[in-house]
Amino acid sequence: MLSDPHIISNLLYKRILGKLSDRERSELEAWISADPKNAELAHTLTDTGFLADERAKRSDIDYRRPEADLQRRVNTIKAKALARRASVAASIAVIIACAAWIFMTETPYFISDGPLSSTTNTIIIDSIKPGRLKAELSTTHGTTIRLDSLTASESTPALKDIAKNIPVIAPGEKLCLDVPRGGEFRITLSDSSVVWLNSESQLRFPETFGSAERRVHIKGEAYFEIRKDPERPFYVESMGQTVRVYGTTFNIKAYPDEEITYTTLESGSISLTRNIPESGELVLSPGHQACLDSRNSEVTMRNVKTSVITGWRHGRFVLEGQPFESIMRDLSRWYNFEYEFADPSLKDDIYLGSIPRYGDFKAAISILEKCGDVKFTTSGNRIIISRK
């Protein structure tokens, strides 16, 4: 009796094409007759409508490429060798093979010690979805407006258009843009500069910049594309530092729960000054990253791939040499979940590769599980991370 899912999927593929030999047809019919579940699976996997839908779903986000990338490049401290590699073919035959393998061998991601109840606060991995465009804008007078509904299109909302929805807003009034966990947002300021905000971030800025300077304050992570204006220098204040911008693109990551503030210059020119007496001005060149340690106010410099740092803005988590603890912090902010390490030594494992930012959480952790020495389970409302 047939048992190898790859052989079965190949026979099903030949059945669709009408290329089964008499011997193959007999073997396949015997397998189908052996179990009602086999018959149901064969019917599903030879349904051309089902296959077209599955292929369309897989074309939206390519999970296999980053998985293969990680499998080639992952470098964990105690990584295990993998026995097989993901296929990169895009034919219907491979879709059938993948579907057959999932139907017959994959265990579901519902991990719990008991039945799930709608009244209990139990996390289900399948229910964790990626973040989306959402934010809240508030004024010093207490007026607040949710901006989710204003971002249906892909165009960057201009501040002047958002301001029309706020009943009371004075020229030059201080505004605060908050992006929650599980969110992101981008906005065009009054000077036509554009700011992209990552999850759990805040931008404070005036409704209209003055004639002498442009100044904003960031908490969390933001990517800036600043319009050059020699008459009005642009300043970005964050934890323990002030960045002067000369018309450029750069990224600042300054989360209160992290000890290091990272300032990465992509193009143009910026300078950094620590918020301490007698601090000198540190000038960055493109491809440089300044790391300010909040514990001692010391700054170190290093060369980086800017595409790694700004990958979040382009729809990817790029894991170039990042410790696993940092990766999990970023994932938890974007997917909005709580987690803990059952084995603390996992925090220092180093990963290389990338993960699609807009894929489901299940797909993201599946890549990490297959390519590293790690597994994800659940306990109550938390994700538990442990070694295999």
Image: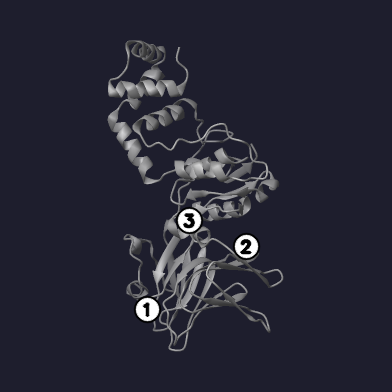
Q: Quadrant of the N terminus?
A: top left
**Mark 2 and mark 1 residues within 8 Å of each other at the beta carbon:** no
Q: Which mark is residue 168?
A: 1
Q: Quadrant of the C terminus?
A: top right
Q: Marks 2/3: CA distance?
A: 17 Å
Which residue is pictured at 57% across the width and 50% down the height? 338
Q: Marks 2/1: CA distance?
A: 34 Å
Residue that label 3 marks: 182
* Dot 2 amino acid type: Asp
* Dot 3 amino acid type: Gly
Residue that label 2 marks: 257
Which residue is pictured at 38% across the width and 29% down the height? 96
The picture places residue 224, in percent across and down from the top left corner, at 46, 70
3 or 1: tag closer to the N-terminus: 1
Is 38 left, or right, of 116 in this rendering?
left
Point out the frontmost of discs 2 and 1.
2
